[in-house]
Image (cartoon, helix red, strand yellow):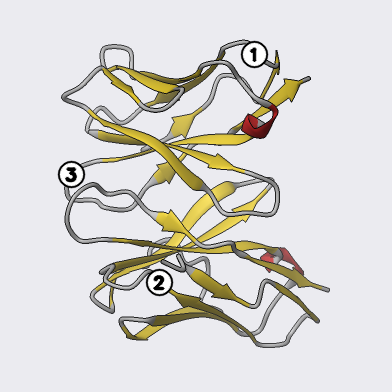
Amino acid sequence: GESVGLHLPTLSVQEGDNSIINCAYSNSASDYFIWYKQESGKGPQFIIDIRSNMDKRQGQRVTVLLNKTVKHLSLQIAATQPGDSAVYFCAETHTGRRALTFGSGTRLQVQP
Amino acid sequence: DAGVIQSPRHEVTEMGQEVTLRCKPISGHDYLFWYRQTMMRGLELLIYFNNNVPIDDSGMPEDRFSAKMPNASFSTLKIQPSEPRDSAVYFCASSPVDGADTQYFGPGTRLTVL
């Protein structure tokens, strides 16, 4: 069946360092991927997305990389700040499905 | 834009009681989703609607759960009777029909069933 998983449950980084959060997916039909950030007591917040016809997309301080060959995507956060501390989820879907399948999440802890 | 609105934010009830969670999607969004989040199972899709019509309810755990969307600006998720294992955070999300499949989430309702 479809599944989306994460390699690391917790990532601790120093303020100012770059962070990399990884995600693996199993459905080769997946063609749309989203990264969400969830702060304590809040709902998931959209960060960045990427379609399968791309392998890289950049936003403000964030970059998502997609490797379809190994079914892997990553979220890179540049110059990590304390406000980046949260749980990060990858989610995937495919054309015609609309609903998202979420990974289990990675907690990012930024040390001052 | 006010974003997705959910009420109540917190609900504590006793086993056997009926619980109704409410959601107002972002105006103009045609898709509405209900999710449940627990430590054990993460974020799970329960049901989603398109233009007020349920499209996929395969994630609804049991007949005790039901969801309705009487109009484009309101949806309810009802649990009757509630059980302690229903304790979770329930999220509503909405999505526009065009463009990306990005979903915008509400703040959630934390449900505790004693």
Q: Nearer the viewer, residue B11 or B97?
A: B97
Q: Which residue is rendered at x = 40% and y = 44% of the image?
A: A101
Label placed on residue A95: 3
Mark in front: 3 vs 2: 2
Kind of residue at disc 2: Pro
* Distance Cα–Cα, label 3 vs label 2: 23 Å
Residue at mark 1 shares a chain with residue at mark 3 = yes
Q: List x then y, in percent, for residue A20.
A: 53, 15
Q: Which residue is rendered at x = 24% and y = 51% of the image?
A: A97
Q: Nearer the viewer, residue B60 or A22?
A: A22
Seen in the image, is A95 located left or right of residue A32? left
Whether B1 is drawn above or below B12: the answer is above
- Count neighbours of disc 3 (C-alpha within 10 A) and say few if under 14, some if 14 to 19, many if 20 or more: few
Kind of residue at disc 3: Thr
* Distance Cα–Cα, label 1 vs label 2: 37 Å
The answer to whether residue A98 is visible is yes
Task: For mark 2, name the chain.
Answer: B
Q: Determine which residue is flagged by label 2.
A: B25
For residue B69, what is the image quadrant?
bottom left
Label placed on residue A16: 1
Secondary element at tag 3 = loop
Mark in front: 1 vs 3: 1
First in sequence: mark 1 vs mark 3:
1
Q: List x then y, in percent, for residue B28.
A: 26, 71
Task: For mark 1, name the chain.
Answer: A
